Amino acid sequence: MGCKVRDLERLRLPQRVMNLLLPDRYQLTPVKKHLIFVYLYLKARTPDLVIISQGDNYDGLHFGHLCRKLKLPYVLICQKATDHFWPPDKSRKYMRDVFESAARCFFVSRHNRSLTEDQIGGPLVNAAVVRNPFLVAADGPRSWPGTEKQGFRLACVGRLHLLDKGQDVLLRMLAMEKWKKRDLHVSFIGHGINREGLIALATKLEIQNVSFPGQTNDVQGIWNDHHALIMASRSEGLPLALVEAMLCG
């Protein structure tokens, strides 16, 4: 699309040498290093609008704070909020100020917006809920697989990352004798940093009716072979796998 992309992790500063020369309070951390580059970039270009897309609801606020100091308009996009992570009291005012100073704050679900307002201690009148794009057609449900005689097939779709997705919870349920005995198969579709750990856990729990077919770009194809979606989750925004499964019927 003609956009220039810069990976902040790949930009180099003589961090170790500089930290030998700097007092403790000025030590160059990864976040400070990122902020230096972004500061120089914003000062050189003075953009009309800065868009900050966060993995959850707080991990990009330091960029918002920088825009606030530079008096540059910015919007925040929050892809996820987590019930079990509340910011420490000393950080809440800082976070609230960054949210309230944004031109708009976008959340992918009403729950994420409400939870964030609770966590920072105030309503966000500049907030709105937006939807992420999905990867299936919206023209009606797929044909039912009709393979119940060969067993009922469930798909657990999502990256294999237990901190957020919690597939280990599902495996421990499937380890119960009543589920082992049922004519049921669960496919864990996706890739991630915990794939080997999940396979090892399934082996330890002696679960035979699971498989790990890996990543696929053919989301609709999943529902040609599976009867239903099953999800276990520790934290979410709005699961696109859920939306896509519903669109496929």
Image: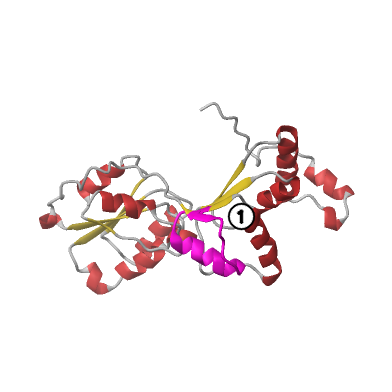
Which residue lies most toward the front here? 125
Using the image as rendered, state which of residue 44 and residue 242 is in the foreground: 44
In reply to whether residue 109 is colored magenta, the answer given is yes
Using the image as rendered, state which of residue 195 and residue 85 is in the foreground: 85
Which residue lies most toward the bottom here? 177
Give the answer, above or below, for where 239 lies relative to 139: below
Q: What is the crowding at mark 1: few (fewer than 14 residues within 10 Å), some, or many (at least 20)? A: few
Give the magenta part as a residue range.
106-128
Q: Quadrant of residue 177?
A: bottom left
Q: How many marks?
A: 1
Q: Can the viewer see residue 30?
A: no
User: In the rendered view, does 158 fall on the left or right side of 95?
Assistant: left
Q: Residue at x 88, y 55 (%)?
A: 23
**Looking at numbered disc 1 in the image, what kind of residue is underneath it?**
Asp
User: In the rendered view, does 89 fall on the left or right side of 27?
Assistant: left
Q: Quadrant of residue 121?
A: bottom right
Q: Residue at x 36, y 69 (%)?
A: 172
The chosen color scheme is: secondary structure
Residue 160 % position (x, y): 43, 54
Using the image as rendered, state which of residue 29 and residue 101 is in the foreground: 101
In reply to whether residue 233 is colored magenta, the answer given is no
Using the image as rendered, state which of residue 45 and residue 165 is in the foreground: 45
Give the answer, above or below, for where 86 lies relative to 72: below
Q: Residue at x 85, y 57 (%)?
A: 24
Disc 1: which residue: 59
Residue 201 % position (x, y): 40, 63
